[in-house]
Each structure stands twice: as structure tokens, then as C-alpha cells.
Image (cartoon, rainbow, N blue to C red):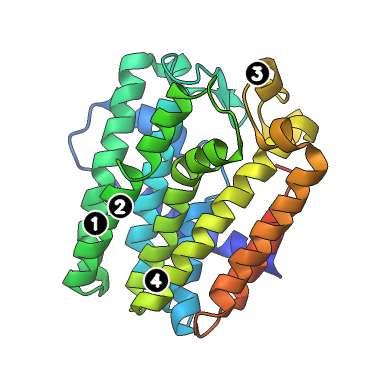
Amino acid sequence: MIEDYLRRMRERVEEALARAVPADWPVPERLREAVEYSLWAGGKRLRPILCLAAAESVRGEASAAERALPFAVAVELVHTYSLIHDDLPAMDNDDFRRGKPTNHRVFGEAMAILAGDALLTHAFYVVARAAEAGVPAERVLRVSGELARLAGFAGMVSGQAEDILEERGVTGPEDLERIHARKTGALIAFALRAGGHAAGAGEAQLDALELYGRKLGLAYQIQDDILDVLGSEERLGKSTGSDARGQKVTYPYLFGLEESRRRLRLLTEEAKAAVRGAGLAAPDRLAEIADLLVSRDH
């Protein structure tokens, strides 16, 4: 069952996350508390799980995921930092995340910013330690560069900037897709590529994993937009209808629910086709994850 696999992988990721910041480092207690508050606030751990699943798909061996664990931890640290900063008053100004008060509501804006800074910086430290898990140094170097690229100017940060700059200026699907391809899809694409690197994937396989990640990232965003219209607040852990109240341009706003669902299904099929045609030893797990994400309700 795919649900059992996701549960096992999530437990594996969380065991590694618990060891990510050494307990004997002289970190101010308030900063450590702020970091742990958001890092352990819940969430599906989708990005790190995809990283591990990508490694397994290349080799067809469950043991391949062990070498990818540092990269999986790093992507979750970056994702958590992005959520903390996204919620800040200068950004989305959100009061709740995953059913709990947002980081800055609990620890104040300054400590929330520093918690995000610490998580982002530490991600590169964790990547650098991957050589100790048996990943060749040249692969570690490439992953470090790809993380900087896809989480920064060429990816997530630029997507966040465009989201702010064009929030009221988005006029069509091209604008919306470009923003989400960077803001959501780029970090997911990194997770897949990093897992591939850990398992020794070839260039064509890395490109296929990235394409899967980008297609899946857009599909994931469309499903988020749909859930904001139709989802349960109890299941989502946040208020629904916020996009409409904020007059935010979303896929349902531009296309309606039926067309949004059609695009969701199409992107999912394209993601699955990318990995099934890449010569991976075991692509079916990634296909199963894609199918599950289409039907999620939170």
C-alpha cells in the first residue's frame, strides 16, 4: 500500500531530522525552540519522501534511500524556512499554519526571520555531510549548486518575488504557471534530482526526474487551489476561501473547477509518463505517489 510506504518514509525522514541540528551546539534556546516549532508542526514531508523515492526508483533498491537521506533532510529544512518567511506580515501575513499559530505569532517577527535564516543555512551544511553517507564528492557538489539555484534566483525565491510583484497583475495562465513553476515546482524538482544524484542517475534520468517534479509541482498547486474552494477547514488545518477573499488569482479563478481538474489529471499523467520512459529500475512508486496526490483532501 502506498500509504504504508509514505508512513515509513516519513518516519525515516523524521528520525533524520531529529539528528539534523546537533544537541551540543551552542544555539540560543529561543532560536532552537522557534526552529523546532515549525520543523515539527506537522506536514506530509512530501519533498523529502520524493527525494528518497527518486533514489529508490533509479536503483530499484530500498537501500538507495539511505544515501539520499542528507539531501532529503536538506530539502525539508529549506521548505520549512520558506513557510516561516511566507507567513510573515510583510509576505502573506498569515495567522495559522497547519492548524497552529504561525511562527512569528508565537516567537515574534525577528526570531521567526532568524529561524528561517538558520534553517536555510543549515541545509547546505547537511548537504555537505552527504559524502559521509557514501555520495561521491562530485555529486555532493552538484547537489549543493542545484539547491542554491532551484531554491534561489532561478527557482523558489524568484517565484515568491513574482507572486508579490504580480499578485494583482496576473492576467493569464502563462503568468500563473510561471510563478508556480518557480515557487512550488522548483523545490520539488530539486528533491527529485537530489535523490537521483544520490543513486548515481545518468543525465537523461536526472532530467526525467526533474520533469516529473515540475509537472507534479504544478498539479500539487492546482489541487491546493481546488481545496481552498472545496476543502474542509478541519482537514486542511487552515481557513478555506482565503484565495477568493484576497482576490488572489488561482487556477479555479481563471479556468473554473472542471477545467482545473482536467489540468490536474493531465499534469499527473505527464509526470508519470516522464519517469516511466526514463529507464529507471523501479518507477512505479513515483507513479503511485502522483496518483495519490491527485486525490488528496488536505
CB of mark 2 within 8 Å of CB of mark 1?
Answer: yes
Quadrant (top left, top right, bottom left, bottom right) of the C terminus: top right
Q: Amino acid at mark 1?
A: Ser
Residue drawn where x is 62% and y is 23% of the image: 248
Q: How many marks?
A: 4
Front: mark 3 or 2: 3
Please state the horizontal and vertical placement of residue 70, each as a whole percent of the image: 32, 60
Q: Amino acid at mark 4?
A: Leu
Residue carrying label 1:
144
Residue carrying label 2:
147
Residue carrying label 4:
206
Please state the horizontal and vertical placement of residue 60, each as a whole percent of the image: 50, 84
Front: mark 4 or 2: 4
Residue drawn where x is 47% and y is 15% of the image: 105
User: Seen in the image, is 84 located left or right of residue 150?
Assistant: right
Q: Which mark is residue 247?
A: 3
Front: mark 4 or 3: 3
Residue drawn where x is 62% and y is 48% of the image: 220
